[in-house]
Amino acid sequence: MMFGGYSKGGLELPTVVHISISRFIKSLPKKGEPLQFLVAMHVEGTGVTWQKNVIIDPLAEMRLLDLTEDLYLWSVHASFRKEEASEKISELGKILHKEFFGNDGEAFLGMHDPTTVLLNIDETIMNLPWELIGKNKPLPLEIPFGRLVTTRILPKGERDPLAEDSTLKILAIGNPTGDLSGSIREIEAIRGLEGEHAGYRIEVRTLTGVEASKKTFLELARTGEFDIIHFAGHGDFRETSPKMSGIMFSDGMFTADEVQAIGWKAPPYIVFNSSCESGRSGGGKRLISGKGSGNGMAAAFIAAGVSGYAGYFYPVSDTGAALMTKSFYKGMLELKNIGLAFMEARERTVWELEGTLDLAGYSAIFYGDAATGKRRDLQTAH
């Protein structure tokens, strides 16, 4: 991605573990049938991939979906006490871990002590909150963690890093509807990044209030000039029609259905969609349909060539989103490592919001290479 380097706690040789959860047949199962997957684990720079078959029975699937829905209700203040919600977070993470990793998968991870996990999930199961997976606590709170997606749809080309200069350009869009003060704090934090840094320069173009229109956004995005696009505002996920999910600009909604038609000269490296449910997708669906409609905003932007996409699985507060954003960009500059920056932003957000109803830290999603820079295979190739 944009930054290299890996340094935390004296680590010298990163261990990047790829975990793949894929369907080995093209057809989708019928309602009520067991779900069959192939789970594979591989350490970058090694010559072996370990794999096993996993079958999720209908009862386990239902429990996962029920817990996912329960936490949604919690995030919109609809039910439960805090203690119950904490128990559900733990139970959901443990079920994901038990069903997909199991004791043998846990043994594999224990043998290799990963410094980063890249979870490559099948496009049809993007609808689960994988960021909660863990035997004792969510894995993404312990090490850098990124989602990758296996798809049968041919995505568009990515940005070419060899064509880049030393200027990092950010398009920051905030508070288009005028009712989210926290989103202005996000934009101010990003604007504060402007200037000269060691070896590169950051330039920020901002759009706020009425100026943050869909029309202006598309005009700027199509130039292909921006390395990062950040949106801070209202988002909407429609489970029954994911293609109509979107983000609200001052002059209307921009939907997942429209992403493929942006027509940019080059996609950005990262889209950070700091809005409610901006990382959600519908279950049992492809990344994009045969007509090019995205299965939610995350799926749509990934299929459109974006290398990294950040968003949220659940509704989040103005305060939680602002905290996550400020922590992430501060870490990005200090650590020069996207994965570590996102992990530390998660940790701080969870800690700061402890005791509240806000799931911003738990539900923050990063699609892309969370390991970045220094890799084991590059160091051992010679």
Image: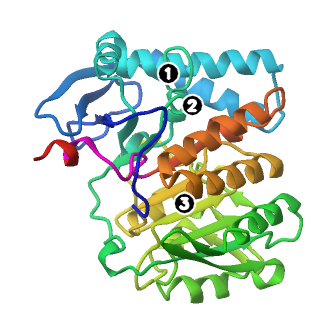
Q: Residues within 10 Å of mark 1 (few under 14, many from 20)?
A: many
> Which amino acid lies under the numbered mark 3 shown in the image of this protein?
Met
Which residue is disc 1 drawn over? 134
Query: Which SS class for mark 2?
Result: helix
Q: Is residue 125 above or below residue 80?
A: below
> How far apart are the alpha carbons under marks 2 and 1?
10 Å
Q: Amino acid at mark 2?
A: Leu
Query: Residue 325: image x %, image y %?
Result: 69, 54
Q: Which mark is residue 233?
A: none
What numbered label is drawn on residue 297?
Answer: 3
- Which of pointers 3 and 1 indicates the residue nearer the eye? 1
Q: Nearer the viewer, residue 227 or 154?
A: 227
Q: At 39% across and 18% down in the image, what residue appears? A: 99
Picture coordinates of residue 140, whole percent (x, y): 52, 33
Residue at mark 2: 141
Q: Position of residue 124 (x, y in %)?
A: 39, 43
The range drawn in magenta is 368-377
